[in-house]
């Protein structure tokens, strides 16, 4: 009973029409709305999706990229109103649900095999 109530409350916050379609291993650009004072701008975070977790309105995804030789990861809520859009740049073929092994790799070892269209 309580799960049905939770689903009913969460339903209005889930993006259905413009839900981003991406999977683990995809290279994506996450366009995030940033509030600076009274102005709002869009900031892009580019990287590889290494994990997805949760379900419903609590679903999250983790994007990893290399900045100045240092690995940077950021978690985003899939259904957040702060996410303007998620743009898929490149689809990859992976055989894991979580790509945490990429944290230990550097250089060309980080590359993933591109999916054929």
Image: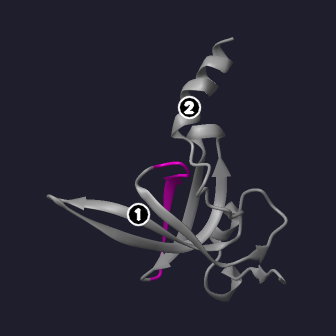
Q: Is residue 29 above or below residue 54?
A: below
Residue 69 position within the rendered picture, expressed as x and y whole percent measured from the top left: 47, 82
Residue hosting label 1: 32
Residue hosting label 2: 10
Residue 43 position within the rendered picture, expressed as x and y whole percent measured from the top left: 36, 70
In the image, is 34 to the left or to the right of 48?
left
Q: Residues within 10 Å of mark 1 (few under 14, many from 20)?
A: some
Q: Is residue 75 above or below residue 115?
A: above
| Kind of element beneath mark 2 | helix
Please give the name of the residue rendered at 50% of the width and 65% of the height, measured from the top-left corner: 85
Q: Residues within 10 Å of mark 2 (few under 14, many from 20)?
A: few
**Position of the C terminus by quadrant:** bottom right
Q: Nearer the viewer, residue 90 or 101?
A: 90
Work out how far the residue at label 1 is from the one at label 2, CA to CA, in angstroms.
22 Å
Residue projecting furthest to the front = 17
Residue 55 position within the rendered picture, expressed as x and y whole percent measured from the top left: 66, 40
Please give the name of the residue rendered at 51% of the width and 55% of the height, measured from the top-left corner: 75
| Kind of element beneath mark 1 | strand
Q: Which residues are magenta?
A: 69-80
Residue projecting furthest to the bottom = 108
Indicate yes or no whether the magenta region holds residue 59.
Answer: no
In which image quadrant can residue 38 be found? bottom left
In which image quadrant can residue 90 be found? bottom right
Residue projecting furthest to the top = 1
Q: Is residue 89 above or below residue 78?
A: below
Residue projecting furthest to the left = 37
Q: State which tag comes first along the sequence, 1 or 2.
A: 2
- Considering the whole magenta stretch, tell me its main secondary structure: strand
């Amino acid at each position: 009973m309580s799960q049905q109530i939770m689903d009913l409350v969460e339903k209005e916050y889930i993006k259905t029409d413009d839900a981003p379609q991406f999977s683990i291993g995809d290279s994506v650009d996450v366009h995030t709305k940033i509030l600076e004072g009274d102005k709002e701008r869009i900031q892009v975070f580019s990287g590889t999706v290494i994990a997805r977790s949760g379900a419903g309105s609590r679903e999250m995804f983790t994007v990893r990229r290399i900045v100045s030789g240092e690995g940077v990861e950021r978690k985003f809520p899939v259904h957040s109103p702060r996410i303007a859009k998620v743009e898929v740049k490149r689809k990859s073929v992976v055989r894991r649900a979580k790509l945490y092994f990429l944290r230990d790799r550097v250089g060309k070892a980080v590359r993933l095999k591109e999916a054929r269209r």
